[in-house]
Image: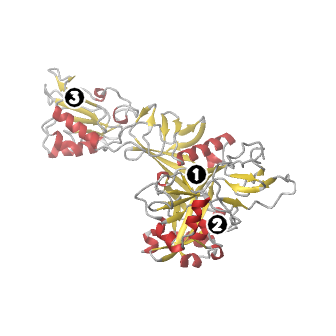
C-alpha cells in the first residue's frame, strides 16, 4: 500500500467536526507502530497515526481510538427535537441529545424518526451484524430496520438528460478529465441517456480512470455539478435537478413530442391560421397537410416537398443530420429541408409555419408569385399557438439514478442465511431504501436496486480508495419476518437505545446526530410501505 492508503502524511482531522462515536479497530498488526490504529471499515485496512485521517477521510485516530467523523443522519417527520428549523445541516450537541434520550420508545416512534445508513459506518467484512438493527413501531406493528453503509464496486449512474440537442452517437464514450467514465445509451422520448461508472471503469482500467470515475459518481450522487465530454458530440454540464448545459448553453425546454405528435396536438388550433405547418424534428418531422390530423380537418394539399425518408403520410425520417439546431438537427435554416414546391398544387400567398418541437425555433413564410417562401411577420394568433407549444414543454432537467448491486457479504450483516433476505425482498416483505429514499429493486436474481439521488439527503455518497462508492442502505421489515429469515435477533435494539448509544460496536460513546427532513415531500415514509403493512 502507498503511504496515502496507509493513512500517514494526510491532513489532520478538523477538531470541530462532529463525531458520532468510537469504532473498534482491527486487532493490532504486530508490525504496526504503537501509535497507529488499523481501520477495518473497507479492504484498504488503513493504519492511521494519531491525529490523522484514513484514506477515505471518514475515519480518524484520536488518541489511539478509531473515530467516525460524520454524524448519523436521521430522517424526521415534522420539526426535529429542540429545533424550529427544517435545515438539513442541523447538528445536535450532547446536551440536546440527552433530551432525545429521555423520551420513551413510543414517544420517539410517534415523532417519526428513521435511522438512515448515512454516517452509520460499515461492519466490513460483514460476518458481523450491521451497525444498527433498530426496533420501532409503525401503525402498531413491530418493525425492524437493518442499517449500514454498503461498499459498492458493482454500481453505476443512469443519467437522463431532457433535451433534443444531439449529445453524441449511441455507444460513444463519455469522458471526464480525459478518462473514459461511461457511454451514451439509447435516446428516449425527449431525453438522451448516459450510463456512467460501473465496475469496469472503477476497477477494470487504470488507477486514474478508477479514481476519476469514483469522484464523478460521488459528485453527481451528492447533487454536485460535473462536466463531461462525449466522443463525436457535445460538452455537457450535469447536475441532478438542474438544467443541462450543452456546449455552454443552458437548456430550457423538453420537447412537447416528436414532430408528428406536435402536429396531432395543435392541428385544430392551426386550422384557418396556416395553410401548411412543418414541425422539424431529428426523429419524425411532421407535415400538417399530409398528416392524418390534417386530413381529418380537411386541410387541402399544399404541394410541399420534404427531403428525407417518408415513413407514413405527413411523417418523415432523416430530414437532416443530428445536431444542436432546429429540433435536434444540424440545420440553422429550416428551408434547407424543403425541395421545390409542386407548381400544380401550391399557390402564391400560401402561408407556411415552420417550428421546432419546443417552439424555441420558429419562422413564418408566405409564398411569392414564383412559389418561393419569403419571410413575413408572424400573425399574433399564430404566435400564440407557437407559445402554447412552449407552454406544454416541461423544463429541461438532469435526473441521476444510482444503480447498485447489493451483494457480497453486505447481506450477512442482515442475516446468517443471505438468500433468505433476497427471497424476502422479492416477496415484498422487505422494504429497501437508500438514505430513507424509496428504491426500485430489479427483477431476477440478486438485489439490484435503483434510486433517484434527489430523493436522498445531500452528502449521502462517500468513497473508499479501492476504488468504490459508499452508499447508505436500509432494510425494513416486520419484526416477525426478520426473525423468520434468520436475522441477528441478539443485536436488535430499540430506537431510543440506538439514539443513546449509537452502533452496537460503539463502546457506548454518545451519538452525534444530524436531523434531515425527507428531501422529496412525496416520498413514502420508510416505515409505512404498504406491502409490509397493508
- Residue in front for this viewpoint, 46 or 375: 46
Secondary structure under tag 3 reads strand
Going by the image, does 153 lie left or right of 308? Answer: right
Going by the image, does 77 lie left or right of 122? Answer: left
The mark that comes first in sequence, 1 or 2, is 1
Mark 1 vs mark 2: in front: 2
Identify the residue position indicated by label 3 in the image: 364
Verify CB contact (< 8 Å) between mark 3 and mark 2.
no
The location of residue 68, given as percent across then percent down, is 67, 55
Q: Residue at x 27, y 29 (%)?
A: 338
Secondary structure under tag 1 reads loop
Dot 3, crowdedness within 10 Å: few (<14), some or many (≥20)? many
Q: Is residue 376 visible?
A: yes
Q: Which mark is residue 461?
A: 1
Q: Considering only vertical position in the picture, is 520 above or below 382?
A: below
Mark 3 vs mark 2: in front: 2
The mark that comes first in sequence, 3 or 2, is 3
Amino acid at each position: 500500500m502507498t503511504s496515502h492508503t496507509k493513512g500517514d502524511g494526510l491532513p489532520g482531522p478538523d477538531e470541530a467536526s462532529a463525531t458520532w462515536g468510537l469504532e473498534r479497530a482491527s486487532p493490532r498488526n504486530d508490525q504496526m507502530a504503537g501509535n497507529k490504529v488499523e481501520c477495518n471499515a473497507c479492504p484498504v485496512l488503513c493504519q492511521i497515526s494519531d491525529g490523522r485521517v484514513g484514506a477515505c477521510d471518514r475515519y480518524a485516530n484520536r488518541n489511539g481510538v478509531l473515530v467516525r467523523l460524520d454524524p448519523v443522519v436521521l430522517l424526521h417527520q415534522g420539526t426535529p427535537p429542540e429545533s424550529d428549523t427544517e435545515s438539513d445541516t442541523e447538528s445536535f450537541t450532547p446536551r440536546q441529545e440527552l433530551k432525545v434520550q429521555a423520551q420513551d420508545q413510543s414517544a420517539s416512534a410517534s415523532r417519526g424518526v428513521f435511522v438512515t445508513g448515512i454516517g452509520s459506518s460499515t461492519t466490513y467484512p460483514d460476518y458481523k451484524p450491521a451497525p444498527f438493527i433498530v426496533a420501532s413501531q409503525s401503525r402498531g406493528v413491530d418493525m425492524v430496520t437493518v442499517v449500514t453503509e454498503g461498499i459498492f464496486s458493482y454500481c453505476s449512474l443512469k443519467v437522463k438528460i431532457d433535451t433534443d440537442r444531439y449529445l453524441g452517437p449511441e455507444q460513444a464514450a463519455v469522458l471526464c478529465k480525459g478518462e473514459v467514465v461511461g457511454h451514451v445509451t439509447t435516446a428516449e422520448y425527449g431525453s438522451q441517456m448516459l450510463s456512467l461508472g460501473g465496475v469496469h471503469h472503477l476497477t477494470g482500467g487504470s488507477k486514474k480512470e478508477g479514481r476519476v470515475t469514483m469522484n464523478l459518481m460521488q459528485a453527481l450522487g451528492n447533487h454536485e455539478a460535473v462536466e463531461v465530454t462525449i466522443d463525436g458530440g457535445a460538452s455537457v454540464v450535469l447536475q441532478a435537478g438542474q438544467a443541462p448545459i450543452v456546449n455552454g448553453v443552458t437548456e430550457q425546454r423538453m420537447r412537447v413530442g416528436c414532430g408528428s405528435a406536435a402536429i396531432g396536438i395543435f392541428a385544430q388550433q392551426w386550422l384557418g391560421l396556416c395553410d401548411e405547418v412543418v414541425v422539424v424534428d431529428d426523429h419524425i418531422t411532421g407535415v400538417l397537410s399530409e398528416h392524418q390530423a390534417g386530413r381529418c380537418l380537411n386541410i387541402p394539399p399544399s404541394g410541399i416537398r420534404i427531403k428525407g425518408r417518408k415513413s407514413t403520410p405527413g411523417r418523415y425520417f432523416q430530414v437532416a443530420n443530428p445536431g444542436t439546431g432546429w429540433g435536434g438537427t444540424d440545420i440553422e435554416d429550416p428551408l434547407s429541408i424543403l425541395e421545390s414546391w409542386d407548381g400544380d398544387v401550391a399557390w402564391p400567398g400560401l402561408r407556411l409555419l415552420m417550428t421546432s418541437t419546443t417552439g424555441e425555433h420558429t419562422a413564418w413564410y408566405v409564398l411569392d408569385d414564383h412559389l418561393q417562401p419569403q419571410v413575413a411577420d408572424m400573425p399574433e394568433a399564430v404566435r400564440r399557438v407557437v407559445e402554447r407549444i412552449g407552454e406544454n414543454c416541461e423544463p429541461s432537467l438532469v435526473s441521476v439514478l444510482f444503480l447498485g448491486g447489493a451483494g457480497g457479504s453486505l447481506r450477512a450483516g442482515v442475516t446468517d442465511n443471505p438468500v433468505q433476505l433476497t427471497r424476502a425482498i422479492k416477496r415484498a416483505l422487505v422494504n429497501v431504501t437508500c438514505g430513507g429514499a424509496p428504491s426500485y429493486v430489479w427483477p431476477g436474481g440478486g438485489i439490484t436496486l435503483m434510486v433517484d439521488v434527489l430523493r436522498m439527503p445531500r452528502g449521502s455518497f462517500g468513497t473508499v480508495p479501492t476504488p468504490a462508492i459508499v452508499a447508505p442502505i436500509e432494510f425494513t421489515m416486520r419484526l416477525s419476518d426478520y426473525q423468520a429469515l434468520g436475522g441477528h435477533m441478539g443485536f436488535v435494539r430499540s430506537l431510543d437505545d440506538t439514539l443513546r448509544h449509537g452502533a452496537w460496536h460503539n463502546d457506548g460513546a454518545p451519538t452525534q446526530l444530524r436531523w434531515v427532513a425527507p428531501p422529496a415531500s412525496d416520498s413514502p415514509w420508510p416505515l409505512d410501505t404498504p406491502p409490509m403493512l397493508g
